[in-house]
Image (cartoon, rainbow, N blue to C red):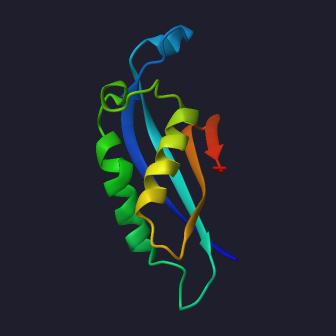
């Protein structure tokens, strides 16, 4: 089993109801790391540029420079965003690879990681 990770960045705003200061609209410069896994049967598991493209069509284009509360139908916490990104990217991956994890770094002190089920 081999693992391949791709790191991308996006900027978004959000608010979390009933969460003190986070109840106010505020923004983050997020870093997201998508890690896929599979058996190596050729020179690479997947072209990293293709993984980048799939991340952008799956969720990054929708999230970048938006108010996240307006584009998702759930409260956009780091944890719930991880689950959403994992699920959406899983839908468009080639059959020979599977999602391993999504890591979302919200600030230098806060990150969430989702490994699926």
Percent from the top left, x then y, of residue 90? 49, 58
Q: Position of residue 9 (x, y in %)?
A: 43, 50
Q: Residue at x 58, y 89 (%)?
A: 41
The vertical placement of 25 against 81, above or below, is above
Q: Most extreme residue toward the bottom, as rendered?
A: 42
Check the image and report above or below for 100 versus 103. Answer: below
Residue at point 29% right, 37% down?
65
Q: Residue at x 39, y 45 (%)?
A: 10
Q: Is residue 116 left or right of residue 9?
A: right
- State the quadrant of the N terminus: bottom right
Is residue 27 depicted above or below 56 in this figure?
A: above
> Between residues 94 and 77, which one lies in front from this camera angle?
94
Spot occupied by residue 18 in the image (x, y as percentages of width and height): 53, 8
Dividing the picture into quadrants, the one containing residue 108 is top right
The x and y percentages for residue 61 are: 30, 48
Q: How many marks?
A: 0
Residue at figure coordinates x 40%, y 24% from the top left: 14
**Of residues 103 and 75, which is closer to you in this image?**
75
Closest to the observer, 60 or 107: 60
Which residue of the protein is positioned furthest toward the right in this rendering? 1
From the viewer's perspective, is 108 left or right of 28?
A: right
Taking the image as shown, residue 80 lies to the left or right of residue 51, namely right
């Amino acid at each position: 089993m081999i693992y391949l990770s791709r790191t991308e960045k996006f900027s978004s705003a959000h608010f979390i109801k009933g969460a003190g200061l986070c109840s106010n609209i505020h923004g983050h410069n997020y870093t997201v790391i998508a890690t896929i896994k599979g058996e190596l049967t050729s020179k690479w598991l997947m072209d990293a540029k293709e993984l980048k493209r799939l991340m952008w069509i799956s969720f990054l284009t929708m999230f970048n420079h938006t108010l996240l509360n307006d584009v998702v139908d759930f409260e956009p916490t780091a944890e719930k965003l991880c689950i959403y990104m994992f699920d959406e990217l899983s839908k468009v991956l080639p059959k020979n690879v599977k999602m391993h994890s999504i890591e979302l770094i919200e600030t230098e002190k806060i990150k969430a990681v989702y490994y699926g089920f």
